[in-house]
Amino acid sequence: MSEVLKQSAVIEAPGLRFKNSALASYLPAIVAVVGAVLLTLLRIQMGGDNFISDGALMMLALACYLTAAVFHLTDLYAPSNVATKLGLWSATLGVFFNLGSWGVRWIAAHDRELVMLTKSGYGPDQMPWFFRYIPFANLYDLSLAFAFGAGITTLLIAHRKSFRFLGAISLPLAALILILARFIGNDFIDLPPVLDSYWRPIHVGIASLSYGVALVCFAVAVVYLLKDGVKTEAMAIWSSIFALSVFATVSKFSVFAPSTFGTYSASVFRGESRFSLALRADIPYVGWLLVLAGVLLVGVIIAFGKYLSSNSEAARGWGHRLLNLSLVAQGIAIVTLVSQIKSMKNVLAQVNPRQYERFSIWMLQQEKIDPARIAQFSGPELRQMAEGWVEQNGAMLRLSLNANPVELAALITAFAATLFVIIFSFRTDKLRAALPPLEKIDSLMYKTAGVSFAGLALLLMTGAIWANESWGRYWGWDSKETGAFVAWLTYGAFLHTRISRGWTGRASAYFAVVAFLLVIFTYLGVSYLLPGLHSYA
C-alpha cells in the first residue's frame, strides 16, 4: 500500500495548492485526524454540558459517508471535478466526525467515572489513569473504530484519480457499520477488572484498524470482479442467496420455518432494563413481507440461472424485474419493522402464549434453580407461573431497536446488497470503462490484503498477551480467538497462492471476498451468536 500512497496527486484547498507533493496525498487524512484531535481537546475545555454528544457526531459521520458515496458513484457514471471534490471532502468530514465521536466518547467516559468516584469519596490521587477510559469496552466502541479504519484507509487511497471508485463501495460499507453501532446503542458499561489492562486499547485498536483495511480490500475485490467481466446477473444470484439466508436466520424463529411461517418476532424488554426477556413479540406484516421478498429472490435465482445457462434475454428481463420488486419488498419490510417497534404500545397482545413454558424455565434458570428441580415442574405449572408473571408485568413490556442489532443490521445489509447489484446493472459497460485497468485494481487488492494479513497477525499476538494477563493463558480456543485465527489463515492463503502459485485476478478476488466474510463473522457472528469470553449478547 505504501507504493500506492507515494504516487503524485493534485489536491486543492481554499488558498492552497499542493502539486506533486507528498503532503497532497495525505492532506485529507491529516485534516480529518488533526480536526478530530482539536475537537476532543475542545471537549475537554468546554465540558460536556454544552458540547455536542458522541452519538450526534456519529450520526453526522454516517450522513457524510453516505453523501460521499453518492458523489463518488455519480463521478463514476458522469465524471465531474465538482463531484470528485465533493466526494473527497465529504469523506474527509465523515472521518473527522467519526474519529471526533470516538474522542468525545473517551472524554465522556472519563467524566462519568470521575463523578462516580467523587460521590464514593475517592480523592484525586485515587482516580484511575486516564488511559483506562479509551473507548474500547464494547461492540459500539469497536464499531466506531472499525468504520474509522475503513474511512481513513479510503482517504489514503481514493485521492488518486485511478482509485476514486473506491469510495463508492467502501464508504457505504463503513456507513453500514455505523448503522449497526446506532442500533447497538452508545450506553457506557462498567469494565470488568479482569479486562482492565493497557493491552486492551492496543489489541482492540489493532483489530478495528485491521478490519477497516480488510473492508477496503473486500471493496477492491468486488470492483475487480465487476471490471473483469463477471456478469451482474451472477452477482445478483449470490446476493439473493445471501439475502435468503438472512431472512431464514435473522429472527430467532425463521420466517420460513413451518411452525412460524410468515412470522417475524422481536425481543421483549421489561421496563427500562437493558436485558431482554425470553419472550418474543410478533411484528405484524414484517414476516409476510420478508416471505414475499424471499419468493421474489427465488425467482431471481431461477431467471438469472436460466439466462446464464442458455443466454435467454426474456429470462434476464424477468430476473431484473423480480430483483427490483424484491428491493421494494425488503425496503417496506425494514420501514414497517422500525416503525412498529418504535410505536407499538400493547406489546403483550403480540406475545404468543405458546412461549410461556419456555419463559418460565428461563426465569427459573435466572434464579439459579437446580436443573433437576426445574425438570419436576409440569407443563400446566410452568404456564400458570408465566401467566402470573405476565399479569403483573404485562403493562411494562416494551420493544427496542437495540434488542439485537445484528438482526436489523443484517436486513439492511441484505437490502444494500440487492441495491448495489441493481446499481451495477445500470449501464454496466460504462461503469466498467470508468474503472482503472485490471492490473491496477489487482495490485491494490494485493497490497490491502497484505496489510490486513499483517494487522490480523498483530491482533492475534496482542490478544494472546492480553489473555495471558487476564486469564492466565495465551490461547484457549475461544470462539472469537478461533474465528480471528481462521480469518488470518485465509488472508495467509491469499498471499501464499499468489506468491508461490502465481494466482492473480479472479482467484485472488474470491479469496479476498471469503476472507472478509470470515472477518465479519468474527466481528459480529461470534459476538452475538456463539458463547464465549468475547460474547456481547
Image: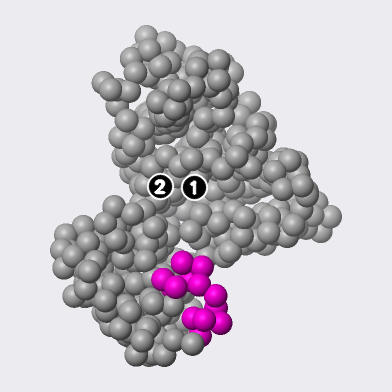
Q: Between 45 and 447, which is closer to the camera in this rendering? A: 45
Tag count in the figure? 2
Q: Residue furthest top?
A: 15
Q: For residue 31: magenta?
A: no
Identified at 56% across, 29% down, the residue is 132
Circle 2 residues within 10 Å: few <14, some 14–19, many ≥20:
many
Q: Which residue is under mark 2?
A: 181
Q: Which residues are magenta?
A: 362-375
Residue 414 appearing in the image? yes
Q: For residue 366: magenta?
A: yes
Label pair 1/2, CB-CB below 8 angstroms: yes
Identified at 32% across, 72% down, the residue is 280
As drawn, 374 above or below 12? below
Numbered label attached to residue 158: none
Q: Which residue is under mark 1?
A: 139
Position of residue 337 measured from the top left corner of the image (x, y, whole percent): 25, 65
Rendered image quadrant of residue 201: top right
Disc 2 residue type (three-letter): Ala
Please, what is the dominant secondary structure of the magenta stretch? helix
As drawn, 403 above or below 181? below
